[in-house]
Amino acid sequence: MALRGLRRFPRSTVLVVVTVALGIASCMTSLLLLHVLSGDPLPGRSQHLYLAWMDTLHRPPRVDTSGMALNGVSANTFGYRRLKREDAEALMRGRAGVRQAIVADVLADESTEDGTRHLASQAVLATSSDFVALFGVPLLHGRSWTVAEETARAPVVLIDSDTAQRFYGTVDAIGREIRLGKRNYRIIGVFAPYAPQPHFFGLDVGSFTGNGGENLLVPYTSALANGLMPMTGDGCDAGVDVSQTGASDPAHCASLSLWVQLGTPGQVASYRTYLRAYADDHPGDRGKTTAARYGLYGVRQWLDMNGVVPASARLNVLMASSFLLLCMFNVIGLLTARFLRRSTEIGIRRALGASRLAVFAQHIGEATLVCLAGGLLALPMTELGAWILRRQGDDFSPLVRSDPWMFGALFAIAIVVGMAVGIVPAWRASTVEPGLQVKSE
């Protein structure tokens, strides 16, 4: 009977279906974008990862009226919380046994040893030996480098499978060499393409890497020895001539990030105490009387501090939800009008013995069916919205993709909307008095 009811008034049925589809599609598109922006970059790992930082610069960045730091570093990069090399290495030595990694993005030209294949100006991740285990990089072949190789500045490298296939025609490129800058590096490991989203350990390069992350991992000691400097820095010591050393030379500038793995609240508290003690012992120009500036930031806190999820994304969800609510009110009115136009039919059913519950169930079923049809129509509309978002040119645009969970949520919303908007019209229909309707006929 609910299916017959849908066919009874086809024009209003189509209007209700389209109204529901528009509301659900707008809501799902905004939720899809928020899901991409606020996703967990490393599920199961990120809750135990922390960025360690302290300010040991001998002169904090001083800003002129143009917004540029007088020591050559953009003023707005001071928020990336990085360290000078001696401090990063001292912190690692002082907490032996804790899994930790120095991280910095460097820019380098990549080519095969014979120069036949070449990629210009690629982001390469200079890091330490614990990075693979700490961040869960999926190794396919080979191994990571050892602490001994890192200390010896060994020219070794890990390469992702896409680059290996492109350069050497095979994923298993162990033992081959790749040229970075002016030096050849021996490939000791191949990993699956690795690009956590958001790109939390390299926000200076970009909050999202929609076209893929860094395709090579090299020991930071070897990269620095080869003249591959970090791409950006937070500031440099006083008296440093950045035109000679570069504004991101880690010997004099804060340009290396330090990430640590801390599994329990006790370990977090202990490491925070350790940071404070180190910062107190290295006051720099602030002197002993000024409080030390240091911090230990979890991944989610770090992303929130840097505004990775823009307020506009949450505002879009609020606006789309409001639009869905408006659509629901319109559907309630349309369904009420549809159901009450059948008052005579309902009265006759009641006179023949149908209960109010049976009439209520019929009309709730009709409302749910029409909203499910709206949910089906919302599928291509949501895909259209995702396609439009992918054409926006933002760094996260290529990442906007639907997934089974989102489609499941869409149908759940359709069912909930159907039952919610159907309650009032179905209740109105079930309260029709059969005697009055039969007499009127």
Image (spheres, grey):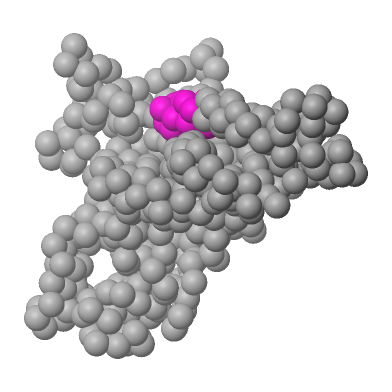
**Nearest the camera: 39 or 345?**
345
Across and down, in percent, residue 417 comes to 63, 39
Residue at the spot x=39%, y=78% of the render?
A: 190
The C terminus lies in quadrant = top right
Please say if 167 is above or below 62.
Answer: below
**Nearest the camera: 414 or 199?**
414
Which span is picked out in magenta? 310-324
Is residue 322 highlighted in magenta?
Answer: yes
Residue at the spot x=74%, y=25% of the render?
A: 440
**Nearest the camera: 226 or 281?**
226
Residue at the spot x=27%, y=81% of the render?
A: 165
Across and down, in percent, residue 367 comes to 65, 42
Please say if 316 is above or below 108.
Answer: above
**Nearest the camera: 103 or 29?**
29
- 360 displayed left or right of 199: right
Could one spot residue 300 in this view of the protein?
yes
- 325 displayed left or right of 107: right
Across and down, in percent, residue 218 comes to 34, 65
- 73 displayed left or right of 307: left
Please tell me in which quadrant of the rendered image residue 341 appears: top right
Does the magenta stretch mainly form a helix, a strand or a loop? helix
Across and down, in percent, residue 248 comes to 26, 41
Could one spot residue 297 in this view of the protein?
no
Is residue 281 highlighted in magenta?
Answer: no
**Tag count in the figure?**
0
- 299 displayed left or right of 415: left
Residue at the spot x=54%, y=27% of the render?
A: 330
